[in-house]
């Protein structure tokens, strides 16, 4: 209580009176008095969560009102989780370069770090392949903006190798897989269980850019990934799609602040569908 009074430049008794009045108005206790210490009750913790959101919204309001409309509308801070396909990210942001008035700030990182930046208003939009609707009690909107079927990708087959079939040919090649953190990897493992198949796993890779390089540069292997990851290699013929796995998809989401004021530029971006061809 003494430390709080110092930070607020007021007296300890004034804070005590305000807390007591709030508790009387609510008809419940926000603190447990344990000796000389105050410990938040369950209701107190809930009140604190909402209070923090209220103050965050107040800061956001001031930032919007004090920043000129021109400046506010031309800044867009986009985050992406680090294992998201770079080709997908490019497909999402490429149309934005036609908007000469728009200034982009692009950031990458772990999902937890990116959600922290989003909740603290350091980001406007987060691109993810994992849906998230809330973070530390902070409500978020999550919109599906694209999905792509998962494929088996590899180097062009020699004429003597025969046709690749699913699931029969899966056991004939060393396999490059995304890590178990990937949603579609977990689904693939369940399919293999259903097929009574134990694939020969050569490597499990967290980063899609690395998975792309390994698929391109490692002979006699196959890789599990969406085609957007190796879009350029498929166009050039360096890699080919052996088959699609219709039961498997990677989904791509735009995550943003629920209920926040959103200028028309942001709305247009979230409504758009990236061209991943």
Image (cartoon, helix red, strand yellow):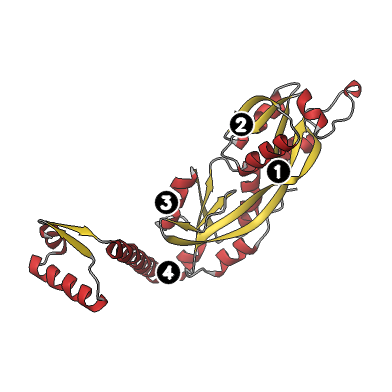
Q: Is residue 120 above or below residue 191?
A: below
* Location of residue 178 in the rendering, given as x and y in whole percent from the top left corner: 62, 35
Q: Is residue 240 above or below residue 275?
A: above
Q: Is residue 85 left or right of residue 104?
A: right
Which residue is identified by label 4?
68
Could you tell me which residue is drawn at 76 percent across and 24 percent down?
Answer: 173
| Mark 2 closeness class: few <14, some 14–19, many ≥20 residues within 10 Å | few
Q: Is residue 113 left or right of residue 233?
A: left
Q: Which of pointers 2 and 4 indicates the residue nearer the eye?
A: 2
Which residue is identified by label 2?
210
Q: Nearer the viewer, residue 66 or 37?
A: 37
- Please say if the residues under marks 2 and 4 sit with CB atoms less than 8 Å apart: no
Q: Earlier in the sequence, mark 1 or mark 4?
A: 4
Q: Earlier in the sequence, mark 2 or mark 3?
A: 3
The alpha-carbon separation of the residues under discs 1 and 4 comes to 38 Å
Q: Residue 116 has which mark?
A: 3
Q: Secondary structure at mark 2?
A: helix
Q: Nearer the viewer, residue 186 or 139?
A: 186
User: Residue 241 sits in which quadrant?
Assistant: top right
- Please say if the residues under marks 1 and 2 sit with CB atoms less than 8 Å apart: no
* Location of residue 233 in the rendering, given as x and y in whole percent from the top left corner: 74, 35
The alpha-carbon separation of the residues under discs 3 and 1 comes to 28 Å
Could you tell me which residue is drawn at 30 percent across and 61 percent down?
Answer: 42
The alpha-carbon separation of the residues under discs 2 and 3 comes to 26 Å
Could you tell me which residue is drawn at 64 percent across and 39 percent down?
Answer: 185
The alpha-carbon separation of the residues under discs 2 and 4 comes to 42 Å
- Please say if the residues under marks 2 and 3 sit with CB atoms less than 8 Å apart: no
* Location of residue 172 in the rendering, given as x and y in whole percent from the top left corner: 78, 23
Which residue is identified by label 1?
228
The alpha-carbon separation of the residues under discs 1 and 2 comes to 14 Å
Q: Residue 84 has which mark?
A: none
Q: Which of pointers 3 and 4 indicates the residue nearer the eye?
A: 3
């Amino acid at each position: 209580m003494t430390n709080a009074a110092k930070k607020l430049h007021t007296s300890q008794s004034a804070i005590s009176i305000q807390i007591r009045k709030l508790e009387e108005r609510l008809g419940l206790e926000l603190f447990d008095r344990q000796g000389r210490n105050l410990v938040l009750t369950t209701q107190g913790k809930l009140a604190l969560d909402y209070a923090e959101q209220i103050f965050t919204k107040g800061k956001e309001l001031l930032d919007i009102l004090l920043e000129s409309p021109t400046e506010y509308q031309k800044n867009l801070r986009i985050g992406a989780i680090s294992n998201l396909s770079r080709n997908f990210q490019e497909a999402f942001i490429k149309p934005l370069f036609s908007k000469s008035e728009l200034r982009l700030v692009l950031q990458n990182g772990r999902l937890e770090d990116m959600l922290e930046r989003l909740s603290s208003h350091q980001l406007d939009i987060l691109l993810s392949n994992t849906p998230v609707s809330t973070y530390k009690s902070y409500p978020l909107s999550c919109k599906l903006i694209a999905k792509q079927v998962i494929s088996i990708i590899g180097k062009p087959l020699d004429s003597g190798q025969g046709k690749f079939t699913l699931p029969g040919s899966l056991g004939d090649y060393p396999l490059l897989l995304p890590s178990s953190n990937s949603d579609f990897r977990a689904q693939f493992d369940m399919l293999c269980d259903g097929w009574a198949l134990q694939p020969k796993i050569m490597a499990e890779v967290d980063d899609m850019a690395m998975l792309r390089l390994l698929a391109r540069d490692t002979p006699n292997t196959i890789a599990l990934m969406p085609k957007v990851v190796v879009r350029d290699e498929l166009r050039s013929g360096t890699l080919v799609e052996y088959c699609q796995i219709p039961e498997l998809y990677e989904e791509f989401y735009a995550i943003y602040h629920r209920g926040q004021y959103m200028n028309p530029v942001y709305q247009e971006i979230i409504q758009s569908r990236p061209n991943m061809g």
